């Protein structure tokens, strides 16, 4: 008999040693210890309240679990692979410590609804932590935007110079992205924050449990409504992995821009030495390793989403051992997202801005050509005619190796007699950004208003 197993009653042979190691999850699911103990305490108290087990047993169970929690946090608890997972490790130690009372804890529940509970409790805690890290990154972006409100840079499409924009406006674009990431996680929390305990293995339980009491003890606003779905559902984890993937995509896009901006070709920014490394052979190098690594880690988060989607795609109801593979992708994504957000917030806060280089680049590449066309439209020329006239002016500048602001009035009038002396004031990069004074635009007034709106939590 497999007497060392809490489920070994019907077995006559011990588990193969390699099978035991292959199927065990304790090496990664032991991080669920706090949630497992919290859930077990709530379950035990409910069993006592319902008269399912004696109240003196409840007291012994709660005390025993609290001692185990202290042992784990002190590092004196020995985890055993032969006990498979965090649930069995804790239950076995409890029974060894308090005797018969410990064996009554599992009354009215299964490992299937127990693990579903633990994952939901854990993910709920981690989403709260991730939202805090997002807020720290948003605060760092807002601070940089406030301190560099007057800095003008080139805006790009197709990575080609397009129109001048405020650097703060560019940063605020990422603020909007990370606000959406936060909203996605907060919405995901609605699906996470549902109590599965009470579903049993798949069909519920014969004992008169009070699921509402347990939900109240564990701060769940709702309970699952179908026992089969409760133990089979990992949609909430998939939703989190999807939200995490989108968040990492945003960080990766930002990483790419920081990497470009810090090159000698751009020299828009300088990352603090604490977030860069050097070369083993080239003494002049300062490599932006942090954004490069965040960009690289995005792929593993995408992979975690695909891994769990693939695990779940063909599973019949209800629980299957395949679902043990949900934890490592989930844990890895949580760790990667938290680490990336934390290091990004610190890096952005210490980032130095080369305003002069940005301002110079903002005026290159005929970036105010659209402003010239708008100028002609305001003078009464149809936009398509204005577009053609400015295109001819740009062609003239290319042929003569000039920029638009180097043209004389006589040269401007080669392309349209609508040009007058006021053209020169209309095509500075500052005039270009100030002119876009519409909600969502890059004008200083609009950008400052958005910064204040975000500071007020709107």
Image (spheres, helix red, strand yellow):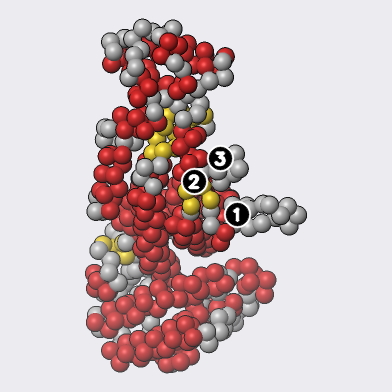
Q: Does residue 414 appear anywhere in the picture?
A: yes
Disc 2 versus disc 1: nearer the observer:
2
Q: 26 or 20, which lies in front? A: 26
Element type where label 3 sits in the image: loop
Disc 2 crowd, CA 10 A, few/some/many (<14, 14-19, 20+):
some
Percent coordinates x, y for residue 386 in the rendering: 37, 12
> Label 3 vs label 2: CA separation?
10 Å
Depicted 337 relative to depicted 30: above or below: above
Occupied quadrant, residue 433: top left
Depicted 386 relative to depicted 39: above or below: above
Percent coordinates x, y for residue 145 in the rendering: 37, 48
> Label 2 vs label 1: CA separation?
20 Å
Which residue position holds label 1?
289
Occupied quadrant, residue 109: bottom left
Q: Is residue 380 left or right of residue 412?
A: left
Residue 266 numbered tag: 3
- Nearer-N-terminus badge (3/2): 3
Which residue position holds label 2?
354
Residue found at x 37% / y 66%: 125
Q: Is residue 56 left or right of residue 353?
A: left
Percent coordinates x, y for residue 395 in the rendering: 52, 14
Residue found at x 46% / y 37%: 359
């Amino acid at each position: 008999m497999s007497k060392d197993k809490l489920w070994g009653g019907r077995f006559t042979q011990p588990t193969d040693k390699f099978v035991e190691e292959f199927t065990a999850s304790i090496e990664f699911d032991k991080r669920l210890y706090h949630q497992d103990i919290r859930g077990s305490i709530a379950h035990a108290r409910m069993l006592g309240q319902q008269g399912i087990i004696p109240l003196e047993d409840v007291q012994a169970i709660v005390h025993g679990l609290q001692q185990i929690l202290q042992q784990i946090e002190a590092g004196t608890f020995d985890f055993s692979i032969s006990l498979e997972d965090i649930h069995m490790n804790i239950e076995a130690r409890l029974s060894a410590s308090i005797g018969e009372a410990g064996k009554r804890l599992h009354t009215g529940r299964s490992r299937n609804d127990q693990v579903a509970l633990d994952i939901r409790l854990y993910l709920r805690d981690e989403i709260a932590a991730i939202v805090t890290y997002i807020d720290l990154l948003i605060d760092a972006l807002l601070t940089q935007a406030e301190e560099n409100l007057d800095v003008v840079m080139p805006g790009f499409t197709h990575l080609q110079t397009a129109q001048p924009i405020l650097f703060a406006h560019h940063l605020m674009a990422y603020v909007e992205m990370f606000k959406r990431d936060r909203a996605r996680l907060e919405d995901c929390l609605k699906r996470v924050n549902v109590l599965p305990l009470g579903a049993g293995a798949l069909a519920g339980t014969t004992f008169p449990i009070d699921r509402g009491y347990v939900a109240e003890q564990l701060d769940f606003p709702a309970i699952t409504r179908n026992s089969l779905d409760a133990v089979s559902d990992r949609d909430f984890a998939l939703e989190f992995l999807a939200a995490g993937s989108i968040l990492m995509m945003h960080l990766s896009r930002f990483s790419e821009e920081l990497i470009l901006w810090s090159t000698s070709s751009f020299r828009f920014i300088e990352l603090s030495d604490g977030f860069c490394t050097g070369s083993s052979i080239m003494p002049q190098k300062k490599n932006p390793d942090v954004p490069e690594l965040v960009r690289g880690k995005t792929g593993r988060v995408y992979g975690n989403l695909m891994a769990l989607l693939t695990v779940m795609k063909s599973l019949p109801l209800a629980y299957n051992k395949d679902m043990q593979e949900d934890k490592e992708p989930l844990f890895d994504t949580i760790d990667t997202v938290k680490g990336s957000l934390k290091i990004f917030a610190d890096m952005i806060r210490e980032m130095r801005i080369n305003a002069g280089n940005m301002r110079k680049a903002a005026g290159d590449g005929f970036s105010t050509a659209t402003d010239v066309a708008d100028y002609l439209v305001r003078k009464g020329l149809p936009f398509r005619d204005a577009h053609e006239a400015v295109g001819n002016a740009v062609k003239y500048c290319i042929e003569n190796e000039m920029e638009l602001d180097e043209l004389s009035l006589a040269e401007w009038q080669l392309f349209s007699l609508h040009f007058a002396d006021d053209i020169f004031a209309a095509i500075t990069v500052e005039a270009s950004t100030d002119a876009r004074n519409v909600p969502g635009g890059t004008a200083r007034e609009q950008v400052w208003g958005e910064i204040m709106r975000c500071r007020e939590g709107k």
